[in-house]
Image: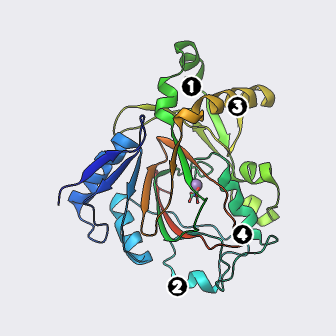
Amino acid sequence: MAIHARQLHPLFAAELTGVDTSQPTPELRADIERMIDQHGVCVLPGQNINAQQQVDFARLFGALERPPQVRGSRGARDAKFPPEIFPITNLTEDGQIQTEDNAARAYRLANALWHTDSTFRQTGATYSMLHARVVPPHGADTQFVDTRAAYDRLPDTMKSRLEGLEAVHSIWESRGKLGGYTPTPEELVARPPARHPLVKVNPNTGRRSLLIASHVSHIIGWPEAEGRALIDELMELATRPEMIFSHQWRVGDMVIWDNRSTMHRATPFEDGVYVRDLTRVTVREFAA
Ligand code: OGA
Ligand code: MN
């Protein structure tokens, strides 16, 4: 069946129909990669797959990340998942809704800040694939912006100012912004910062994008406050309301985004009342 794409936002994002992720083939990989290169975010509705099938599909695109140990999130419940699954959930290991003092909840809440997955790892990430199992009746959209469109809109003077700059990214920077999750000394050592260029070039398309967002702590060689001001300015430009595509989840949706072309964030819902249970897999950009 041929894939059909319907554009979801004037700048980027498309819904793809005619895709069956339970049948991973090299042809499907090529088709999806072409769609992602073009649209940045692709929504694939009606994917009735289990966690192992999600992993098998994602493996078409490269080596997969493994999630870190987060206090309060890895336990009996996750033992049923393959090790490449990141549970994006408000359930505890025994299937109860997380309470406000749950460490995994505090860790997850930082997803509400604009971010790009895994920029805090030196190995980076190409695609993230998030699959919805249970969704709340309202709220909890995931929002996206296109960081290629954001780059394209910069004045030439800004583009040349950014050339060659590198930023430091750390998971503890984004977690520190909201408080609530304090890393242990072992966690600090286990997850050191990474450095990446501020302007990223996608090798498939040659297009440039901004690599910024909540994990960035500073710009290498710049005074901290000056770096922060530049990042804040770029973030403001990249996340203006007209740049945002908001995805409202349905059970069975799989959303694939290219972390080299987009930023995203979670939005609130009544997470003490309703269950929201999704699973993510993440494709590494570079070998470990
Ligand atoms: C993620 C993420 C946002 C959401 O899974 O990487 O940021 O809405 N999710 O759950
Ligand atoms: Mn994310």
Please state if 240 lies on the left or on the right of 186 as rendered.
Answer: left
Query: For numbered disc 1, what is the local secondary structure?
Result: loop
> Which disc, if any, is residue 164?
1
Name the amino acid type tagged 4.
Ala
Q: Position of residue 167 (x, y in %)?
A: 65, 36
C-alpha distance separating marks 1 and 4: 37 Å
Could you tell which of marks 4 and 2 lies nearer the N-terminus?
Answer: 2
108 up-or-down from 177: above or below: below
Could you tell which of marks 1 and 3 lies nearer the N-terminus?
Answer: 1
**Nearest to viewer (mark 1 / mark 3):** 3
Query: Which residue is under mark 3?
Result: 232
Q: Residue furthest top?
A: 157
Could you tell which of marks 1 and 4 lies nearer the N-terminus?
Answer: 4
C-alpha distance separating marks 1 and 3: 18 Å
Question: Crowding near pointer 2: few (<14 within 10 Å), some, many (20+)?
Answer: few
Residue in the picture at 46% in, 69% down? 251
258 up-or-down from 186: above or below: above
Q: Is mark 1 within 8 Å of ligand 2?
A: no
Query: Which residue is under mark 2?
Result: 80
78 up-or-down from 229: above or below: below
Name the amino acid type tagged 1.
Gly
234 up-or-down from 268: above or below: above
Could you tell which of marks 2 and 1 lies nearer the N-terminus?
Answer: 2
Label 4 close to label 2 by CB (< 8 Å): no
Query: Which residue is under mark 4?
Result: 104
Q: Is mark 4 within 8 Å of ligand 1?
A: no
